[in-house]
Image: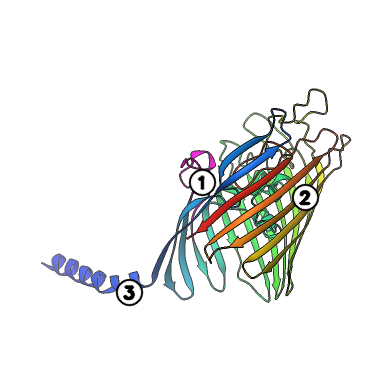
Amino acid sequence: MHQKTLAAAAWLLLASTAPTAWSQSNITVYGVLDAGLSFEGGNKAGSITKLTGGISSGSRLGFKGTEDLGGGSTALFVLESGVQADTGASGQGGVLFGRQAFVGIGNTALGTLTFGRQYAPHYLAAVMADPFTSGTSADEKNLINAVSNGGRLDNSIKYASAVFHGFSADLVYAAGEIAGDTAAASSRGAGINYTDGPLAVRLTYHDKSNDTATTRLASARNTLLAATYTLKAAKLFFAYGVNKGPLSSTLRNATNPYGYTVAPVATSVTRDSTDRLLGVSVPFGPHTLLASWIHKDDKEAANQDADQLGLGYRYALSRRTDLYAIYARMRNKNGASYTLGNASDGGTGDRAVNLGMRFTF
């Protein structure tokens, strides 16, 4: 009888607190659908016209939620699935929640600790510095390799500090999970951020181990300084990156699309380079003009430099829907083989025009 009384009391306690717990929780469904036409030239096989999903932004369906734990603490989660809007197929190689999947706990004074598949500080800095927001054929990822070496990290633990007088910091570690070798295939990154009115600055570093269970290579090390400054009539963008080690600079399309038959061929990607980006966006009413220039400076003997120019226009039909038109041009030097990709495609050549539409919800 005593046990039944205790069970009944516990049930009544849970029932009485349930409405309060639900009222303190928040779950949001969100997403992006982006698709359009991409005209690409410069490939050895000739020009190609593609109906592509995810030109300006990768199409996605996401779920995120928070629960107030009291005392300034919050539990949180994000599940975000990539979708190819042109075919309906899953993005990120078919991984169900390939864009993001993490859970964590945050505190207003202490910061946030999260676990799962999530973005590295290096990638977030690159996106911040890109007036095209890491999309379209003018994408910074074509030359600044934030995705291959420090984009989405599986098996990662990430700490983001609270903001103090405009400053904050990020730390991330992604386990390689190779038996007998805790360093192999692991990644680690850090970032220092500062925001003061119109100025935003990020300084990030990422170190990715190239070791496997059977091979030993030097790691890929990427440092990136990114900054934006918002004026009345325009927003200015800047980035400077230093890349050291094997795979510190990679090709988005490694199939030798330009048909090189003699050395240096497409596979001889630099292990020592710097990147520079200058950009601007000019909004006026529903219109926005965009431009960026990116230079890859190869420090090795092959001197495989590249320059990318991007020009764009966006028209906001509403708060959620916009149309865009983009022109991009890549100039490869001395056998470099960089291509003009977009938010979800590695690209096929050195000339591209994008015409598309994006809807967010």
Q: Which of marks 1 and 2 is nearer the N terminus?
A: 1
The part of the image, by quadrant, that contains residue 358 is bottom right
Residue 52 x/y as whole percent: 56, 43
Q: What stretch is highlighted in magenta?
A: 81-104
Tag 2's secondary structure?
A: strand
Instruction: From the viewer's perspective, tell me whether residue 223 is left or right of residue 32.
Output: right
User: Whole-percent x and y of residue 275?
Assistant: 80, 50
Say above or below: 202 vs 195. Answer: above
The three-letter code of the residue at mark 1 reads: Gly
Picture coordinates of residue 360, whole percent (x, y): 51, 59
Q: Mark 3 or mark 1: name the one nearer the start of the chain.
A: 3
Q: How far apart are marks 3 and 2 (CA)?
A: 54 Å
> Quick one: quadrant of the N terminus?
bottom left
Residue 309's tag is 2
Image quadrant where residue 37 sits: top right
Residue type, label 2: Leu
Out of 179 and 230, give the one closest to the viewer: 230
* Residue behind mark 3: 20
Tell me if label 3 and label 1 are in contact, CB under 8 Å. Answer: no
Mark carried by residue 98? 1
Q: Callout 1 environment at 10 Å: few (<14), some (14 to 19), or many (20+)?
A: many
- Mark 3 surroundings within 10 Å by alpha-carbon count, few (fewer than 14), some (14 through 19), many (20 or more): few
Of residue 124 and residue 307, the one placed in the foreground of this image is 307
Mark in the foreground, 1 or 2: 2
